[in-house]
Image (cartoon, rainbow, N blue to C red):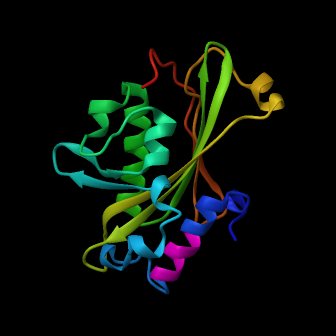
């Protein structure tokens, strides 16, 4: 199991399912993903499509994600529902996976009123329609309450801290998006 998601029951189960479906290929076909095979994971999943000249649209948003963020993004574009700073980060993640065809892990912290509220971990998995390139994304999200130690070590000046990002098929970190001030959480 990949160390970065080994302790996360949802993300590790999603990784195993996706990895089994892809076999020796770079990614599985979208048609190979069967919701009835993963009912426990469904509340934690999204489907994301790239629409030319419009950006990224959420085709589906699971109930745990709706509860975690406080809104349902189904049918909406990222720029319609995310703050500009968060939209920029999410779009970067989605573009990386669409363009590379590689699975990505991202974790970030949300801070409100000088208090670390939640840590969100996600894996963004590519799916193909043609067997060659990513045509849709399958993100899985989990939400965790921070430990008291994490609450006191957070940089409390900002609402969204930089994302920890790494490709899951390569052990080294890609980048740490620099902390960005955010006017209001969505």
In the rendered image, the vertical position of residue 60 relative to residue 34, given as above or below: above
Residue at image coords 55%, 36%: 177
Q: Residue furthest left?
A: 53
State the residue in front, 165 or 63: 63
> Looking at the picture, how far across and down is residue 90, in whole percent?
42, 41
* Quadrant of residue 96 within the rendered picture: bottom left
Quadrant where the N terminus lies? bottom right
> Looking at the picture, how far across and down is residue 160, in whole percent?
55, 27
> Looking at the picture, how far across and down is residue 176, in whole percent?
60, 40
The magenta stretch is 15-21
Residue at image coords 24%, 45%: 75
Residue 8 visible to the viewer: yes
* Quadrant of residue 136 within the rendered picture: bottom left
Q: Image check: 74 left or right of 109?
A: left
Q: Residue furthest right?
A: 149
In the rendered image, the vertical position of residue 162 relative to residue 75, given as above or below: above
Residue at image coords 57%, 31%: 178
In the rendered image, the vertical position of residue 90 relative to residue 173, given as above or below: above
Quadrant where the C terminus lies? top left
Q: Image check: 112 left or right of 69?
A: right
Residue at image coords 45%, 17%: 184
Q: Is residue 18 magenta?
A: yes
Q: Is residue 19 magenta?
A: yes
Residue 169 visible to the viewer: no
Tell me the chief SS of the magenta region: helix
Q: Image check: 6 left or right of 128?
A: right
């Amino acid at each position: 199991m990949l160390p970065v998601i080994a302790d996360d029951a949802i993300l590790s189960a999603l990784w195993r399912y996706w990895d089994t479906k892809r076999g020796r290929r770079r990614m599985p076909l979208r048609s190979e993903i069967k919701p009835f095979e993963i009912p426990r994971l469904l509340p934690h999943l999204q489907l994301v499509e790239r629409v030319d000249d419009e950006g990224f649209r959420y085709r589906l948003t699971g109930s745990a994600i709706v509860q975690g963020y406080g809104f349902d993004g189904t049918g909406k574009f990222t720029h319609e529902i995310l703050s500009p700073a968060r939209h920029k980060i999410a779009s970067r993640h989605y573009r990386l996976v669409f363009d590379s065809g590689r699975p990505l892990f991202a974790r970030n912290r949300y801070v409100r009123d000088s208090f670390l509220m939640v840590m969100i971990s996600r894996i963004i998995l590519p799916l193909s329609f043609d067997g060659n390139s990513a045509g849709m994304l399958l993100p899985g999200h989990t939400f965790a309450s921070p430990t008291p130690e994490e609450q006191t070590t957070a940089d409390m000046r900002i609402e969204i801290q930089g994302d920890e990002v790494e490709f899951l098929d390569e052990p080294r970190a890609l980048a740490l998006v620099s902390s960005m001030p955010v006017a209001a959480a969505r």
